[in-house]
Image (spheres, grey):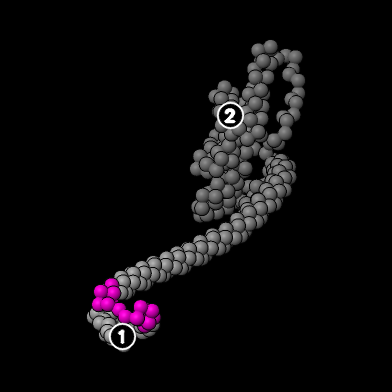
Amino acid sequence: MRDTYIIPISSTGMELFKGNPVMRTKIFIFLLCSAILSGCATQRDVLTLDDRLAQAEKRYSDAEQKNRSLEAKLEEIRNARELSDMEQRSKTAGQNATIEELQEEIRILRGKLEETDYLLKQKINGFTELSEKRQIKLEGVDKTTNSNKDRIERLEQYLNLESTGPIPKRKPVSNTATGKQAKQKRSEDDEYRSAKQAYDKGDFNAAREGFQNFLKEFPKSKNADNAQFWIGETYYREKWYEKAILEYQKVIEKYPKGNKVTASLLKQGFAFFNLGDKSNARLILSELIKKYPKSNEAKIAERKLKGFKP
């Protein structure tokens, strides 16, 4: 009969049995097989086996720890990738939102640009129409001016003033006149005609200077009162009414028997009226009506006085 030996198990082996039931079962089966095959086991074999089990356990533990470490790293990589994907998606969404905002701003700006272009075209068309209307109006003003000029000429003839047309030819000088007198006569007519033409053209400075030179050279000319009257007219046309009144007064005082006294009184009244001095205007026009009741100027003065507000 063989001797029976009890196989001692180290504390490490016992802990291994307690910690892992599967491993404990495998080791038990392995030991049982070894005991059956060998028939008996020495103390040394048991210790060797225990060391080998401990090494196997350590390798297994290291492998599991390494495996857990790898799984942790893998999880970190997965989390990092998911975070990166989320950030990328967020970034992409932000970029898409920015692009949409820019596109919306472009649409708004394009709409404003189209609106501005439309308004600009409308204004240009309006300016064109206004320019055409002004051109038509200017043409109408020109026609009115020409018509008024004709009426002024008729009014001057009605008031016994000189016509703005060409001066009629004078009768030829008598054969008894000397050559010197004929030359002087032509010079007198030329001076007067030149000044009057300047007035008709609207060159009032040249006309005034011409009439003043005419009065200096020919103070006793039969056209002297006319020349003095036209000097007053140049100031009146320039709306320098104070000077016009003084020049008309010279006609009244220097040439009381001339044919420009009534016209000078009438224009004096108009000048005072244009200055806003209705009292003097009424006084002079009333004097005109009183002194020359049958004159054409008196009739005009009466109509003017009727238009005065009290």
**What residue range appears in magenta?**
31-48
Residue 43 is one of the magenta-drawn residues: yes
Residue 27 point in image, percent of width and height:
36, 80
What secondary structure is found at the residue carrying circle 2?
helix
Quadrant in the picture for residue 35: bottom left
Quadrant in the picture for residue 259: top right
Residue toward you, 85 or 203: 85
Residue lying at 66% horizontally and 53% vertically, measured from the top left: 121
Q: On the image, numbered disc 1 is attached to which residue? A: 2
Q: On the image, numbered disc 2 is attached to which residue? A: 206
Residue 44 vs 207, above or below: the answer is: below
Residue 140 point in image, percent of width and height:
72, 47
Residue 19 point in image, percent of width and height:
31, 82
Residue 196 vs 4, above or below: the answer is: above
* Mark 2 surroundings: few (<14), some (14-19) or many (≥20) residues within 10 A: some
What type is the residue that disc 2 sits on?
Answer: Ala
